[in-house]
Amino acid sequence: MLAKEKNNSKKFLITVTNNHIKELKVNNVNFLFPIKELSVGFLNTYSLSEIDVDNSFIYINRILDKEAIKKLENVLKNLSQNIKGICFTDFGIINLVKKLKIDLELIYMQNHNTTNYRSINYYLEDVDSVLISTDITLEEIKVILDNASKPLVIPFFMLVNVMYSRRKLLTNFSEKFNLEKKNKVLLNEPISNNNFLAIENDYGTVLYNQKFIDYRNIIHENVLYYYINPIDLSLSLIEKIIKEEDIDDLSGDGFLHCKTYYQLKEEK
Amino acid sequence: MESIELLAPAGDLEKLKIAYFYGADAVYCSGKKFGLRANANNFSLIELKEAVLIAHNLNKKLYVTVNIIFHNEELNDLEEYLLYLDSINVDAIIASDILVIRKCQELNLNLEVHVSTQASILNGESGLYYKKYGVTRLVLAREASLEDIKDIKEKTNLELECFIHGAMCTSFSGRCVLSNYCTNRDANRGGCAQICRWIFQIPNINQIFSMTPKDLNLIEYIRAMMNSGVNSFKIEGRMRGIYYIATVILAYRRIIDKINSNSLTEKESKYYLAVLNRCANRDSIPQFINKLPSANEQYFLGRNEVSNQDFLGIVLSYDAYNKIVVLEERNYFKIGDMVQFFGPNHETYSYLIEEIMNENNEKIEVANHPRMIIKLKVNFKLEKYDMMRLKVFDKQNFL
């Protein structure tokens, strides 16, 4: 673990956030398409008919209400052969897929509650893989990878979603102050001086930490996919990421070397 | 209609006793470990045992939150903790991490497992996933609509618990780590610093941005929620004080009982709504139950919190022979103030303060020292834990 190896042995999973599919379409890349009406946090979403790449994954990251479950059922019944799997956050999908007897790779991608290997191993009884949390240290990731019962998906280079609200926060704000409505706004929290990118659609608002996390030094034999979420990145930058070339000042290492605490007495 | 439970928060044993006294059927609290209010007092292992005894002596229930998202370092102590909670006959734990849910099933514990709102359940299929692992109750996401609730009930036939009053997260619960990034405190292990109530800036237009939600208040929807299959009505607020707990629990106790006896009038509902609004420090509104919240359900200029000093004292004892009530003072009051005594076993009494005595039976003009002992001559019967508040409005004006 934790030594660089040639990237041609890695399999990448890349969220499709722009139109660079043709350029990035190589053997070791699988695309993940946010699906219309069933995903949040993306300006571009896709209907099934727009997905024409083999071995693609669909991304269902909404928390699904009754109406969304109906839409999802319709999507699942109309999947074509080029869809290899589903990345999801709502456990209702597990049940629905079984009920409809659909044979697809299921990847649980809720990056805030996959923080220990025992929980992950329980999840793996129902799914094929799990995205490891973006909220934990390098040491914690190592223990998880060493003990997981199936190969996992690990963050490779991504914008991390840090908050998901059902509220249309940008719409509400623009209406309140009579401003032009935008679906994407950069926010600054002045005390910590953190910047967050807010992206809204009809199904809610997602805040991303503006700094990408760069976990490209992490390799392990128990990895199924290395995950890239390249919101706002140019094609050349995405190519650099896959080639593991340096990128100027875009990224940090998140919580890899920064343990969080939760009781005030722990604060130093 | 199924049996209905009123579920109260308690941050310590005093609040737990108050919650039961004012009409809660069940109380939820946390031990010192594994709960999402890591910086509240919380209950020691011995206090948890005492809490269970108090609950069961009153024929009521006690639930314990074990609802953090576990990291590797917390794994070792979990099993022992769950076995302890089971051994002292805790009625249920509230969990969100699949680890806790599965561990309870594997250990074949007697206690029930309720899935926390942290799991953000909004559909029946998700409920069925958890049902497979032995849970008996789902605490639904605060974002659930009446239609979602009905559907989940029909599909799962599990007990459903819904928050009806108190603070809201801006985010779906469990899906926010703003606190981790802004303060390094782990939101999903009880360290949330409520960043969604902070002020943000939009740099390129030099405009402040806020996403602070108003509080939740579903008093107008209790009947509809009962009809949709809700079994347990939950009040938020393990960090809140006893006056808040007493007032909110009593209001909802009255509402639920009157709905059950088919005697609730619209005017009474308005009265209880006014009572609830008076004891809150933020505006409270229905939020998601019937529509998607708009700008009206948020604050845009920070926390907008106001507090009052309505809570004047708590009754320690009542001498029925001499008609003297002994109070512990909580806020300043004086001769000439018009106040109210309220409690669960009688109507609210209005009372004009004409004479105040201290604990040495000396006459004084004002009660101005927090927690000082005060005696008042009162002709109506009161009991321990009844409370005295400033009279702000009269129920008769609503009827």
Image: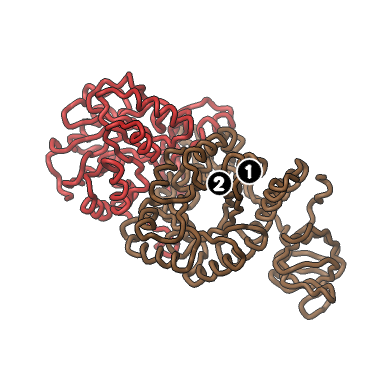
Q: Total label count?
A: 2
**Residue occupied by mark 2:** B162
The residue lying at 35 percent from left, 27 percent from top is A76
* Secondary structure found at label 1: loop
Q: Chain of mark 1?
A: B
| Distance in Å between CA atoms under marks 1 and 2 | 10 Å
Residue B107 is left or right of residue B16, and the answer is left
- The residue that mark 1 highlights is B218
Residue found 51% across the figure and 33% down from its top: A168
Tag 1: Cα neighbours inside 10 Å, few (<14), some, or many (≥20)? many
State whether residue A16 is above or below residue B215.
Answer: above
User: Which callout, 1 or 2, points at the residue further toward the start of the chain?
Assistant: 2
Helix, strand or loop under label 2 = strand
Viewer-proximal residue, B35 or B339? B35
The reply to whether discs 1 and 2 touch (Cβ–Cβ < 8 Å) is yes
Q: Which chain is red?
A: A
